[in-house]
Every structure is written in C-alpha cells, then in structure tokens.
Image (cartoon, helix red, strand yellow):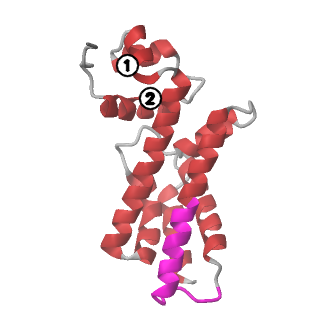
C-alpha cells in the first residue's frame, strides 16, 4: 500500500505559484523548487510530474483566485464598484510576490518560444476578461453604465488598463496609485 504524502499539495501549489510569479518560468529551476518546497526529486515528480505540470497548476490557481476575489468583491460592493475598486487592490497588496500579472508575465516570457504554458496563460487571461465582461453586463443591467457600451469591448480595454497598471506599479518612477484612481474615475463616465 503506497504511503500517504506528508505534505499539503494545495499549500505547495500556492508556494510554487509565488516562486514562479516572482522569478518567472526560466528563472526558476527544478532545484529551486525542490529546495523551496522542501521536496526530494522523487517526491516532486510523484506529486507534480514535471516543472511544467506544476507551473500549469500554479497558473490555474492564480486565475481561479483572481476570479474568486473579484466575484466576492462584486457580491459585496456591486459590479461597477468592484470594477472601480480592483485597480487599487492590484497595486496595494503587499502580500503579492510581484505586482505585475503572473499570467501576462508568463505569456510575454513564453509566447515567443511557442511554449504550451503561454497558451494556458492566454486562456486564463481570456477567462478573466470574460469575468470583467460579465460585471460590465451586470452594471449595464443595473443602469450603472449606459446601454450604448459594448461590455466585451469595455472588458478588453479594462483588462489592458489593469495589465499596464500592474506593470507600471513595478516601476519606481511611476505613481501607480494615480493611474489606478484614473482608471476608476474613467468608469464613472460610462
């Protein structure tokens, strides 16, 4: 009978997500993961199969967590207020390993190499854009934004703004808080 693993797989995925988010795919070696996750090579392969398989799990976790946070925020504040609050949240969190979006970082790093993980990151970004579009539709139905706006187009623009904001927040010479406030204020004009 196989031994039960002595580790919490979900906790390891969350820890690996933070390592990959901070260092990127190429910047994280298998030895880095084994050391940081405190797993021997055999245990690592038994738990995850490969570095790429673990990376795919971390992308999924990152995307699921993002959608869950935004959905909860929308339930608490309403759809438009959630969309207006999101820019500040993505740059204010001191618990994030990096401010730039992990999905965008992955896509930028691996798309030119035609790596499967770039496709996965792109799929997760599309899911996030769909989440934004759903909130714009809900805001439109509630009369919070005008009926003449296309929620899908608003979602694409909003996602682009957030990705740029998150990258700008990594820079010392940019006031990301001002940009976040501008993104939120632009939503009031819809």
Is there any visible trace of residue 45 in the rendered image?
yes
Q: CA distance from mark 1 to mark 2?
A: 8 Å
> In the rendered structure, which segment of residues is drawn in magenta?
129-148
* Residue 131 location (% of width, % of height): 51, 64
Q: Secondary structure at mark 2?
A: helix
Q: Residue at x 46, y 36 (%)?
A: 58
Would residue 132 be counted in the magenta stretch? Answer: yes
Res 171 visible: no
Q: Is residue 11 left or right of residue 161?
A: left
Q: Main secondary structure of the magenta part?
A: helix
Which image quadrant: the C terminus? bottom right
* Relative height, residue 40 to residue 23 (above, below): above
- Counting the numbered discs, the total is 2
Q: Earlier in the sequence, mark 1 or mark 2?
A: 2
Residue in the picture at 35% in, 20% down: 37
Depicted 1 relative to depicted 133: above or below: above
Q: Nearer the viewer, residue 181 or 27?
A: 27
Of residues 86 and 58, the one drawn nearer to the viewer in this rendering: 58
Q: Which residue is tagged 1? A: 36
Measured from the top left, where is residue 164 in percent x and y? Answer: 61, 54
- Taking the spot 47% from the left edge, 69% from the top edge, the residue there is 83
Does residue 167 show up magenta in the picture? Answer: no
Q: Which residue is mark 2?
A: 19
Residue drawn 56% across the image and 76% down it: 186
* Cβ atoms under marks 1 and 2 closer than 8 Å: yes
Check the image and name the residue furthest to the front: 1
Q: Residues within 10 Å of mark 2 (few under 14, many from 20)?
A: many
Q: Is residue 61 left or right of residue 24?
A: left
Q: Quadrant of residue 44?
A: top left
Name the element at disc 1.
helix
């Amino acid at each position: 009978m196989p031994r039960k693993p002595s580790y919490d797989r979900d906790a390891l995925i969350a820890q690996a997500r933070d390592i990959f988010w901070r260092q990127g795919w190429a910047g994280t070696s298998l030895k880095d993961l084994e050391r940081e996750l405190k797993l021997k090579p055999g245990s690592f392969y038994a738990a995850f199969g490969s570095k790429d398989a673990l990376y795919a799990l971390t992308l999924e976790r990152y995307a699921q967590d993002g959608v869950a946070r935004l959905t909860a925020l929308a339930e608490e504040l309403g759809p438009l207020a959630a969309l207006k609050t999101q820019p500040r949240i993505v740059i204010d969190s001191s618990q994030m390993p990096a401010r730039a979006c992990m999905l965008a970082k992955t896509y930028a790093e691996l798309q030119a190499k035609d790596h499967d993980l770039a496709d996965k990151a792109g799929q997760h970004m599309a899911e996030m854009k769909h989440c934004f579009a759903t909130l714009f539709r809900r805001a439109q139905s509630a009369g919070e934004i005008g009926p003449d706006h296309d929620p899908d187009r608003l979602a694409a623009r909003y996602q682009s703004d957030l990705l740029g904001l998150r990258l700008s927040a990594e820079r010392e010479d940019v006031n990301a808080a001002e940009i976040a406030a501008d993104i939120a204020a632009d939503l009031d004009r819809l």
